[in-house]
Amino acid sequence: MDVTVAKREEEKKTRVRFALRQNVIPKKRTVDMASSVICRETQSRVSSVLNRDVKQYGKKFMFDCNEETCWNSDQGESQWVSLEFPQSVRVSEVKVQFQGGFSAKTCRLEGCPKDGDFTAISHLYPEDNNSLQSFPIQEAPAVDKVKIMFENSADFFGRIIVYSLDILGEKAS
């Protein structure tokens, strides 16, 4: 083996060791980490779409991983998003990115079994900005549906704009 190849391999090992120390490369974990419970079979519904223009502002844009697109509700109180999962899940975290000025001041996360009634799981208090915000959920029950009620919009007309929405958790056994 020539000296430059050996030197490059040693540098690579050093970078990997440094990355592991800085938690850039996650170490193998023995416990399952929460991951997105939203999949292709998840059905979503929303309270409204701005001017009924689903091609430009529809619900699908919350889940497309494109920072240029968004769901834009129409005006009015009590805007919401509901998700029905193909199987029961336990929610451990909600991630949402609003457009500043069009966020909710408070949100209520509700859940229910397939044929049950929605009950409150948690209350969320987002900041009025453009950042991706994360809300841990403690000891959530197994649910087949979740609904996020966007209460007290920062917008005078009650509009909500969401660029990204994700629900993390695990399949319930």
Image: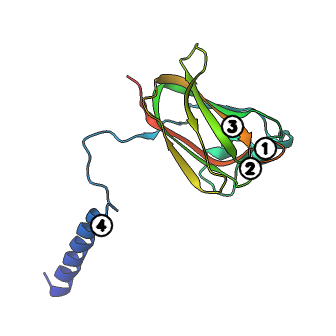
Between disc 4 and disc 2, the foreground one is: 2
Q: Residue at x 56, y 50 (%)?
A: 133
User: How many angstroms separate mark 4 from mark 2 (CA)?
Assistant: 38 Å
Q: Which label was assigned to residue 150?
A: 3
Labels 2 and 1 touching (C-beta < 8 A): yes
Query: For this rendering, which residue is in front, 15 or 130?
Result: 130
Q: Is residue 42 above or below residue 127?
A: above
Color style of the picture: rainbow
Q: Please, what is the three-letter code of the amino acid marked with disc 2? A: Phe
User: How many angstroms separate mark 2 from mark 3 (CA)?
Assistant: 11 Å
Query: For this rendering, which residue is in front, 11 or 103?
Result: 103
Q: Is residue 35 left or right of residue 150?
A: left
Q: Residues within 10 Å of mark 3 (few under 14, many from 20)?
A: many
What x and y, as percent, mark residue 20?
Answer: 27, 63
User: How many angstroms separate mark 4 from mark 3 (CA)?
Assistant: 39 Å
Q: In the picture, which quadrant includes the N terminus?
A: bottom left
Task: Look at mark 2 in the image and give the residue it sits on.
Answer: 102
Q: Is residue 110 left or right of residue 80?
A: left
Query: For this rendering, which residue is in front, 121 or 86?
Result: 121
Q: Is residue 14 above or below residue 107?
A: below
Task: Look at mark 4 in the image and give the residue it sits on.
Answer: 19
Q: Residues within 10 Å of mark 2 (few under 14, many from 20)?
A: many
Task: Look at mark 1 in the image and give the residue it sits on.
Answer: 159
Q: In the picture, which quadrant includes the C terminus?
A: top left
Q: Looking at the image, is mark 2 or mark 1 earlier in the sequence?
A: 2
Q: Please, what is the three-letter code of the amino acid marked with disc 3? A: Phe
Task: Please count the marks in the image.
Answer: 4
